Amino acid sequence: MLVIKQLDNFALNPRTGNIDALGKAVGAPNYWVHGQVTLRDRGDGTFGIYQGNYDFEWHDVNSFRDFARNIGNVGGIIAHFDGGKSYAIRSSGNANVIRK
């Protein structure tokens, strides 16, 4: 199960009407894929993640994590043969949340 660390308080998102909070994926492989995400409180004791697009954004290298992410971007661009075209990430199921 994907583990997400909650970074701020849940609040009403006026654009969507959902109860959301900022979070980030825990663990190197999950963080490299998901990075920061929007946590969504479903109101039934479960949480999901909502994330728009993966955009192959290039990061300035200030840490090994930035370097590794950029290398992953190169691999993704090569694997998809599309020059790094943005694509939508669709998540289903529950996220295990480490509460703030």
Image: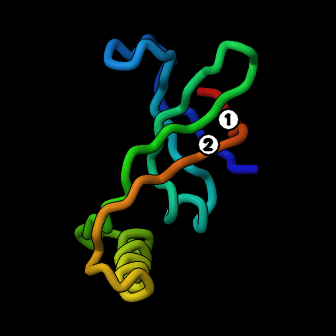
Give, as a three-letter code, the residue at label 2. Answer: Ile
User: Does residue 77 sit above or below 12 in this rendering?
Assistant: below
* Residue on which disc 1 sits: 98
What numbered label is drawn on residue 59? none
Residue 56: image x %, image y %?
Answer: 32, 68
> Distance from label 1 to label 2 (Cα)?
6 Å
Q: Is residue 82 left or right of residue 23?
A: left
Which residue is pictured at 66% across the width and 29% down the height? 47
Image quadrant in which the C terminus is located? top right
**Residue 71 visible somewhere in the drawing:** yes
Q: Are marks 1 and 2 in contact (CB under 8 Å)?
A: yes
Display coloring:
rainbow
Residue identified by numbered label 2: 4
Q: Residue at x 29, y 74 (%)?
A: 84
Q: Is residue 69 above or below residue 79?
A: above
Inspect this view and state whether residue 67 appears.
no
